[in-house]
Image (cartoon, rainbow, N blue to C red):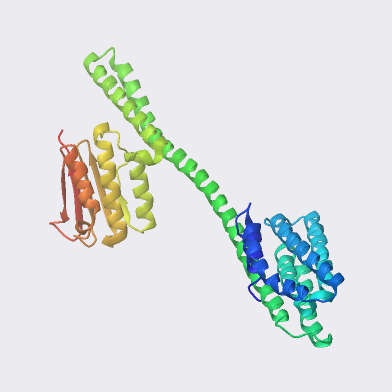
Amino acid sequence: MSRRFLGMTATATGGPPRFGWVFAAVWLFYLGGNVGALLNQPNMYWRVTGLISVAVFAAGYLFLVARGRRRDPSARHTVRVWLGITLLLALFALQVPGAGDHALTCLVYIAALAVVNLPIGQSAPLAVILFAGAEILPRTVDGWADRGYGLAVLLGSLATYGIRMASERQRRLIAAQLELADRAVADERARIAADLHDILGHSLTVVTVKAELAQRLLDVDIERARKELADLETLARDALADVRTTALGVRGISLPGEIAAAREALAAANVEADLPGAADEVPTRNRELFAWTIREAVTNVVRHSRARHVRVQLTPDCVEIVDDGAGGVFVTGQGLSGLRRRAESVGGRLVAGACEDGPGFRVRVEVPT
């Protein structure tokens, strides 16, 4: 008896939103005791009245389940639920003369329906009243037997309350996840803005200085002015490439962005860092490889090395990361193999191992000039 509410509960709180009444209908077979008792009722009037009441009760129950599949806290919804429960109670009463104590089965459905759809302050007193009725009536009405309906009402109410609370927690979790997703979008926008600031701040400053220098050299040293203009074009292209990489996010990796990320990661790990201030001298073709090198090496330092100091040196054709932690840990990971493949794909060379002149580990990537 204590499980007959489950179909309605699953539908009202977490079942399929359009066809939940089908699952609820499965549990209507418990009304078979009512039907059996009514069919054995010798009084034709109460037999017919009871059978019609059972049929209407089942239809009304399924209708209320379908309408209450999404709880609505509005007063209008609460009034509709109370009207439906009142109708079900009236149909229960019409079954009593013909079905006797078997009609108490209906109280389990009514209690579960109320707990799921009504405010707790209203459903709890109703469940207590229904429990008391299911316990008192078999003891006071002649010919009625105690078939455990009171326990079924109690267990059904408690279980549906638990499932209702779980459903509400799930709804709150979904709402929190949506809020976190919105925050993640905002954080990503802020990150991109910060990266663009880091990338363009230095690059545009250098571009401005070189443009002013080239302008002054036009009347003094035309060849040097041309060289400065060529460098200016390269700087502009590199800055544009960094901006595109940052805007694409996961599609690329930015060398200035990795330097900035390394600074934050090492600071968070309480590791003193000696990092290059800019990456403008590194040609575009080497930037992605060097960025991956810094990312992998710094990740190893933070996770495994227990280092206190890290130095990153950057030249147009070489990047080197040296720490003073426990040497050799990085070799055992998968990052080194992937980094070696990246270096070899552009004709470069990876050197990684313990420092020769003291404790620590060195990662160095060189590419042909």
Q: Residue furthest left?
A: 356
Taking the image as drawn, is residue 198 in sight? Answer: no
Of the pair 305 and 80, the residue shown nearer to us: 80
Left-right relation of 20 to 59: left
Left-right relation of 256 to 330: right
Total numbered labels placed on residues in the image: 0
Identified at 26% across, 33% down, the residue is 281
Name the quadrant containing residue 65: bottom right
Taking the image as drawn, is residue 245 in sight? Answer: yes
Of the pair 322 and 26, the residue shown nearer to us: 26
Q: Is residue 188 above or below residue 327?
A: above
Q: Position of residue 53 (x, y in %)?
A: 80, 66
Q: Position of residue 14 (x, y in %)?
A: 60, 59
Name the quarter where the N terminus is drawn.
bottom right
Name the quarter where the C terminus is drawn.
top left
Of the pair 344 and 201, the residue shown nearer to us: 344
Q: Residue furthest right?
A: 45
Q: Is residue 221 above or below residue 359?
A: above
Of the pair 127 and 101, the residue shown nearer to us: 101
Left-right relation of 78 to 252: right
Q: Position of residue 216 (x, y in %)?
A: 31, 17
Identified at 30% across, 19% down, the residue is 214
Name the quadrant containing residue 241: top left
Q: Residue furthest top?
A: 219
Left-right relation of 91 to 260: right
Identified at 57% across, 55% down, the residue is 174
Identified at 45% across, 43% down, the residue is 191
Q: Is residue 83 above or below residue 34?
A: above
